Amino acid sequence: MNRFVRTVALTIFVGGIAIPGGAWAQNHPMAGHGNLQHRSATPPVPTTPIPRPVPMILSPTKQIVKNASGEQFFIVASVDVANSQVLLKRPTEVTVLAKIDAKTKCLDAAGKPIKITSFRAGDTVWARLSSDGPDPTVELMQDGEMTMADLHKYFLDY
């Protein structure tokens, strides 16, 4: 008996959805949801505009964090010796394209002089720039890491 009832119910259910056109399919609010013949090729156009997220606008000076020596922490993105420039990335993901010249001092972690070509993408450095505006020049770039104490001091509130 149960098998018979399930078979009849399934037949009615499938039959009701598969019948195109009938009174149920024309008047029911769910008409067309199971039947591909009632779907249009183009999606419906919304009547109200979709709200767009407002981009967060921050002043570049609010993102600049310097230590007591006036140096900023960067990750080296690339070094272009041919064009005398280096692309540096702040921990906030903001990049700075800075010039390098004959006055630029490059130091290793121990403070010994090295060449600019010693730096590779991914190296972490403390750098002092000539300005925080457009077209800065690197005055000093020293290989170094950010300690956990520095991280909390400059970037975290806890």
Image (cartoon, rainbow, N blue to C red):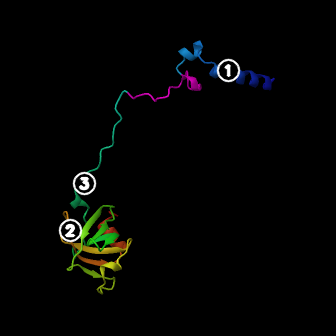
Q: Distance between the residues labelled 1 and 3?
A: 60 Å
Q: Distance between the residues labelled 2 and 3?
A: 20 Å
Local SS, label 2: loop
Local SS, label 3: loop
Please state the horizontal and vertical placement of residue 38, each as a whole percent of the image. 54, 22
Type of amino acid under label 1: Gly
Please say if the residues under marks 1 and 3 sit with CB atoms less than 8 Å apart.
Answer: no
Tell whether position 136 is magenta: no
- Closer to viewer: mark 2 or mark 3: 2
Quarter of the image with the C terminus is bottom left
Tell whether position 32 is magenta: yes
- Closer to viewer: mark 1 or mark 3: 1
Local SS, label 1: helix
- Closer to viewer: mark 1 or mark 2: 2
The residue range painted magenta reads 30-46
Q: Mark 3 points at which residue?
A: 58
- As drawn, the label of residue 136 is 2
Type of amino acid under label 3: Leu
Q: In this view, does 28 lie above or below 129?
A: above
- As drawn, the label of residue 35 is none
Type of amino acid under label 2: Pro
N-terminal-most mark, 2 or 3: 3
* Residue 83 quadrant: bottom left
Please state the horizontal and vertical placement of residue 145, each as a whole percent of the image. 36, 75
* Residue 58 quadrant: bottom left
Q: Mark 1 points at which residue?
A: 15
- Check disc 2: other Cα within 10 Å, few if <14, some if 14-19, many if 20+: some
